[in-house]
Each structure stands twice: as structure tokens, then as C-alpha cells.
Amino acid sequence: EDKVVQSPLSLVVHEGDTVTLNCSYEVTNFRSLLWYKQEKKAPTFLFMLTSSGIEKKSGRLSSILDKKELFSILNITATQTGDSAVYLCAPQSSNGGATNKLIFGTGTLLAVQP
Amino acid sequence: DVKVTQSSRYLVKRTGEKVFLECVQDMDHENMFWYRQDPGLGLRLIYFSYDVKMKEKGDIPEGYSVSREKKERFSLILESASTNQTSMYLCASEKRSGANVLTFGAGSRLTVL
């Protein structure tokens, strides 16, 4: 059975801190891994990782995938209150067809205090 | 600004009522999805559709049905709502790339009394 585990479940930090969010997975026919940010409404896309060891960066956020050890991390440096959100990890399982399936973790709730 | 619009942000229904959740996207996306999100369980796929009049069951289709009569509109139907269907429902869409870079709607929070 496919499994995604995110840790920690929740995290409280102060502005300016650096955080690392973890995602481990066991997914059949793994294709890629996506990270989403969910504030109080719609999840928004952050990164898609397909290859091991290649860091993706967007401003203060970065992410990397290890396909051998089956995990990914999301780093946020110099955190701001606007980073407060639930961060969702979603490995993608390929079915070889027109659609592939995302398996979502339960998320990490990040709260950044001023 | 591209959008996925869910018609109702908050609904309260009674057990046994029929419930329609509507989702419209303006991005000409082929693939559309319905998820529910519950604390401790994450997002779980209910149904998806990759073309007009096509539908596929997701992981938890029991108690739900869907309708895709037009490309831009994907409806989730609860034929007879039950209390265990109280949840946040999220609609999403993507271009037929299979990459699963989904664009989500803001969600519909359904409470069944």
C-alpha cells in the first residue's frame, strides 16, 4: 500500500529561523514528487522533483529529492509570517495512462511567529 | 488570473439530503479531480475525469458520484448525505500532461447534520 509520512506534524518558529520539512514515501511506480503550500484555502504548487540530488529553488524555498532513500526535504530560510501554512508533500504514482495519481501526505503545519 | 471556482464555500445539509458541489475551471484543462480533506488523513481522491462524460473512481468513491457534461464543469454529487461525509471538498484541474501540477479551488466545507 502506498504511504507518505511527513514530519514534523507541526512546527512553531520565529521570523528569521530556517526550517526543514521532511517527507518519506513508499509509492508504486513512482514518477515524481510535488510540494504544495496550503494557507486557509486552495493548495498552491511549489515544486515538482523528478531527479535525485537536483535542488529546486524559488526564493527562500528549496527542495531536494532522494529516490534511493525515498525521501524529500523542503527548506525555508529566513522565515516570514507569510510562510505560515500547511505544507503538503505528494508523490506521484504513474498508471501509464492519461492521468497519474498523487498520494498526499497529511502535511506539516508551520507557524511563524513575529 | 486562471481559476478553479467552487460554487459554495460553506454548506450545511441534513442526513439523507442530496448535495451538489459544483466546480468550474476557466483554463481549458482536460483533467479534473475531486478530493476530500480530513484532519489526520490528508487529501484523498474521490473521483477524477480526463474528458467530457468520462469519469474514473479514485480511492474513496463510495457514497459519491460525479458528472462532467462540459469540459469546464465537474460536479460532485452526494445522493444521500451522511454525517461521515462532513469534510472539506477540494476540486482541482490540470492540463492533460499527466504531470499532476494541479490548480485547486478554494474548497467547499460541507457539514452534514
Image (cartoon, coloured by chain):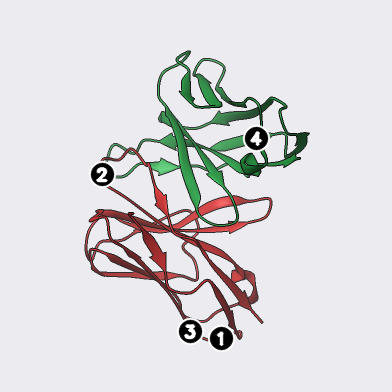
Chain colours: A green, B red
Identity, as a three-letter code, of the amino acid under mark 2: Ala
Give the Cα separation between the discs numbered 1 and 2: 35 Å
Q: Mark 1 lies on which chain?
A: B
* Residue at the (55%, 30%) spot, across then down: A26
| x and y percentages locating residue A2 in the rendered image | 53, 37
In the image: residue A46, left or right of residue A87:
left
Q: Residues within 10 Å of mark 3 (few under 14, many from 20)?
A: few
Q: Quick one: SS at disc 1?
A: loop
Q: Which chain carries label 2?
A: A
Residue picked out by circle 4:
A6
Give the Cα separation between the discs numbered 4 and 3: 36 Å
Above or below: residue B75 compared with residue B81: above
The nearer-to-camera label among 1 and 4 is 4
User: Is the residue at mark 3 from the same chain as the one at mark 1?
Assistant: yes
* Residue at the (56%, 26%) spot, across then down: A60
Q: Quick one: SS at disc 2?
A: loop
Picture quadrant of residue B34: bottom left
Give the Cα separation between the discs numbered 1 and 4: 36 Å
Q: Quadrant of the C terminus of chain A?
A: top right
